[in-house]
Image (cartoon, rainbow, N blue to C red):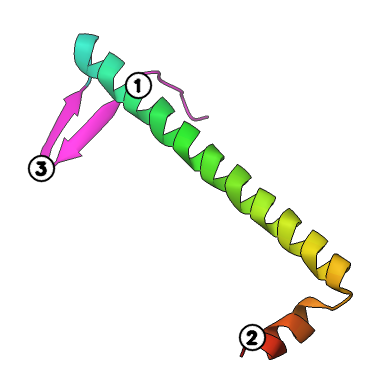
Amino acid sequence: MATQSNEVKIQIGDEITILEGDELIAFNNMRAELHAESEAKKAEAQARATARKALLSKLGITAEEAALLLS
């Protein structure tokens, strides 16, 4: 059975360091920031896809027909 640990280890070359204190806080903040950016990009892509579908529907054409028109 695998054990689970809350330690955060980073490796640079052959050296492995366990993050503690301010380094751990900074790492977790960076991780949260990157996750938030990723979620924002996903939401933006979903909004664009929804807008694209709405526009195609309004024009009465399919995505394939739009691609043909734009190629």
Amino acid type for the residue under numbered disc 1: Asn
Q: Position of residue 25 (x, y in %)?
A: 29, 14
List the residue tagged with mark 2.
70
Q: Position of residue 11 (x, y in %)?
A: 19, 38
Q: Position of residue 39 (x, y in %)?
A: 55, 38
Dot 1 or dot 3, earlier in sequence = 3
* Residue type, label 2: Leu
Element class at badge 1: helix
Per the image, label 2 sits on a secondary structure element best described as helix
Q: Which mark is residue 19?
A: none
Which region is colored magenta? 1-18
Give the residue pinned by disc 3: 14
Residue 7, picture quadrant: top left
Residue 9 in the image: above or below residue 21:
below
- Return the residue found at the far left: 14
Front position in the image: 19 or 38: 38
Is 56 above or below relative to 44?
Answer: below
Image disc number at residue 29: 1
Work out how far the residue at label 2 is from the one at label 3, CA to CA, in angstroms.
52 Å
Label 2 with label 3: CB-CB less than 8 Å: no
- Marks 2 and 3: which is nearer the front? 2
Circle nearer the N terminus (2, 1): 1
Instruction: Establish if 58 lies above or below 27.
Output: below
- The span from disc 1 to disc 3 (Cα, nearest Å) is 25 Å
Residue 38 percent across, percent down from the top left: 49, 41
